[in-house]
Image: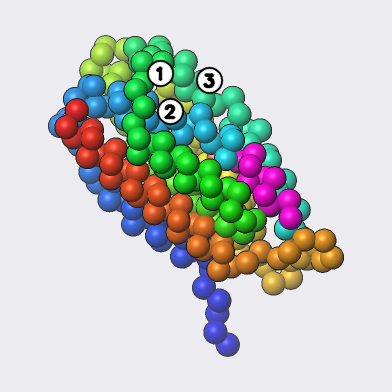
Amino acid sequence: MTETVRLTTAIDERNDRFTSRVKAQLRDLSGLSDVALEWLMLEHFQFSVSNPGFLAAAATTTERLANRGVSAELRRNFQEESGHAAIYRKGLAEIGSDVARRVEFTPTTEFLDTIGRLTTAGASTALGALYATETAAIFEHEVFWAISREVCARRGYDWEPSTIKAFHDMHLDGVEQSHKDELGVFVDPSPTEPTGGGEGGPVDRAEVLAGAEQAIDAMTTWWNKLLAHAATT
Ligand SMILES: [Fe+2]
Ligand SMILES: [Fe+2]
């Protein structure tokens, strides 16, 4: 009997390849200017602003799946993420970074547009894409935990306690892991899982994988451009 490859494993491995490479490039922050580090935080803040909308759109798109749990889980994540950008903005303001000063960076706009499109492209596509972004969220909070600590140190602000540290800690203390794991249940449903029957379609594995791959490609392109720009800032 051949064992079916777990989709979550395949997606996680692909995510790991890009996140480990980016992490390695950001291991030593000493070569990046304060302006560059702040700029990276303000770009990441844009994702925080858009993410609740992605989750809400995906929750609506996935209502057509027989398994209503997918939409319910995405809706739960939407509610959890809803107030986060405001906390992030406050945390950044307290260490001297005003998000209103940000100037649009086209690759970020393009990245957010791509993720937005994937959330409405189809129920299984949306599930795969959001599983991938929730998985990468863990890496992003790790990276921005270190970046904001470095900015605090350079500017002479207390790291502990600080809103910005608490903000990233909260995500790393289980919020993002639970978003990933609880969507993962639907990416790899157990064979005994009731499909819901009747109303709505089943999760399409090929579409889940394609949605996840497109999201990871978009994140990879975005991060390449972020790092290239930061290096010259
Ligand atoms: Fe969040
Ligand atoms: Fe999340």
Q: Mark 1: is the Cβ under 8 angstroms from ligand 1?
A: no
The residue at 59%/67% (across/down) is: 205
Indicate the position of residue 112 as horizontal and vertical percent values. 46, 39
Task: Choose the circle earlier in sequence order: 1 or 3.
Answer: 3
Indicate the position of residue 33 as horizontal and vertical percent values. 19, 25
> Is residue 24 visible to us here?
yes
**Dot 3 alpha-carbon crowd within 10 angstroms: few under 14, some 14 to 19, many 20 or more:** few
Indicate the position of residue 139 as horizontal and vertical percent values. 40, 43
Instruction: Give the image quarter of residue 200.
Output: bottom right
Measured in 3D between alpha carbons, the distance from the residue under mark 2 to the one under mark 1, in whole angstroms, is 8 Å
Q: Is residue 101 above or below residue 149?
A: above
Q: Is residue 1 above or below residue 46?
A: below
| Residues at marks 2 and 1 touching, judged by CB atoms closer than 8 Å | yes
Residue type at tag 2: Phe
- Mark 1 or mark 3: which is in front? 1
State which quarter of the image contains the N terminus: bottom right
Q: Report if residue 137 lies within the magenta region.
A: no
Q: Which residue in the protein does label 3 denote?
A: 86
Q: Which residue in the protein does label 2 denote?
A: 45
Residue type at tag 3: Ala
Q: Which residue in the protein does label 1 denote?
A: 99
Magenta region: which residues? 55-64
Left or right, 222 with respect to 196, comes to left
Task: Choose the circle earlier in sequence order: 2 or 1.
Answer: 2
Q: Secondary structure at mark 1?
A: helix
Q: Secondary structure at mark 2?
A: helix
Relative depth, front residue between 116 and 138? 116
> Is residue 138 visible to us here?
no
Measured in 3D between alpha carbons, the distance from the residue under mark 3 to the one under mark 2, in whole angstroms, is 10 Å
Left or right, 109 with respect to 178, comes to left
